[in-house]
Amino acid sequence: MKKRVLIVTTLLTSMLGHAQEASSGDEVIKNKKGHEILPKKGDIGLGFNTIPILDMFLGTLNRATPFAGSSNVVSFVQASNNQIVGKYYLDATTAIRGRVGINTLSGSMTAQVQDAQAMYNASLGTIDDMNAASLIRVDDKLKFSKRNVLITVGYEKRRGYRRLQGFYGGEIGFGTTGSKQSVEYGNDFSDKYPVQFTNNFNTFGVTTVNPIAAGRTTRTLEAKNTGGIRFGVRGFIGIEYFIFSKISIGAEYGWGYSVTTRRATTSTREVYNNGQNGPEVFTEDVDVDSSEKLKGFSVDNNSGSIFSMNNTLGGNTALSGGAGALTLIFHF
């Protein structure tokens, strides 16, 4: 509670300080200590989304009501904190701006399953051999990587009165996505004995393939999604309020046109097939020769836009251009 009061008090103090600010003949706005408030030619601005910080203190800022559930989350922030924001001022009212979002994720998962070869060898021995073999495990290991990159460059104009500044402009953006994964199974498929393997590395579910059962079982050894390319142009408008000298809070919203393409997926699979000619084990290459192209206009909160896109593995790493989020910007 004390922290909330402190934040509100600080903002009110800054606003009330207007009456004591001085303005020289060349329209340079200064605070009561004589420090310039607004950015000037040659200044650099760096910023980030303040919503996560405010949420930490206020808790309910992004909720429709203080006690609303997760289904009532206000969507005006759309993950805009996934970009670094920078500006360079050509003069006091003109700036070149850039946004960079480079998101990558890689890692591995390991699950243990029963050693099928050891169990088969023990089945030719004693009960004690079987009991001992049942405790032996081998590793199924998944390795994966994915990327989502978006770079935008824009031109910004601004005008306003004293601390309150409005801005508008346009920007272009380019992005790429892609992913790949590979799996090393501890047990090879066999046409002689049952084999356990991990069928889902998210739940560590296990499947047993029995050589006497009819049918076909496949598992992926390697998969590669060449991803897609995204290109777009976007117009934006916003307001900025300088709460302190060279420190501002800005809110922005945009509308843009984007083109998104998606390319084919390739994979290598290991196959166990018990067909008319008996059980057999082999590998096969699968080439999903499909493509997709999307284009159109959208506002920032639309996930179909280049400025708020989803990655290729289904996880949400949306990179929005602003989406109405509050941005804290430092100028120096």
Image: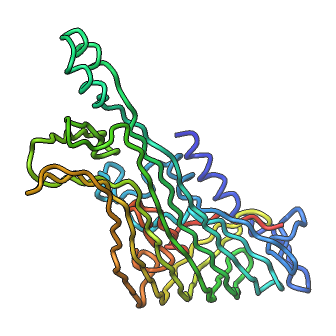
Q: Is residue 190 above or below residue 36?
A: above
Quarter of the rendering occupied by the C terminus = bottom right
Residue name at image x 26 percent, y 24 percent: 121
Q: How many marks?
A: 0
Residue at 75% from the left image edge and 83% from the top image edge: 95
Say which of 199 and 325 sits in front: 199
Q: Position of residue 31 (x, y in %)?
A: 83, 67
Q: Residue at x 70, y 67 (%)?
A: 248
Is residue 162 found left or right of 1 in the rendered image?
A: right
Residue 207, percent from left and from top: 21, 41
| Image side of residue 242 versus residue 332, left or right | left
Q: Position of residue 269 (x, y in %)?
A: 33, 58
Residue reaching furthest front? 277
Dividing the picture into quarters, in which one does residue 239 lie? bottom right
Establish if 71 lies above or below 151. Answer: above
Of residues 323 and 161, the one nearer the viewer is: 323
Of residue 89 and residue 14, the one placed in the foreground of this image is 89
- From this view, report whether residue 292 is shown above or below residue 226: below
The picture quadrant where one finds residue 49 is bottom right
In the image, taking residue 312 as reference, residue 330 lies left or right, namely right
Q: How is the image coloured?
A: rainbow
* Residue at left offset 71%, top offset 82%: 161
Q: Quadrant of residue 135?
A: top left
Residue farthest to the top? 128
**Residue 146, image x and y in percent?**
50, 60
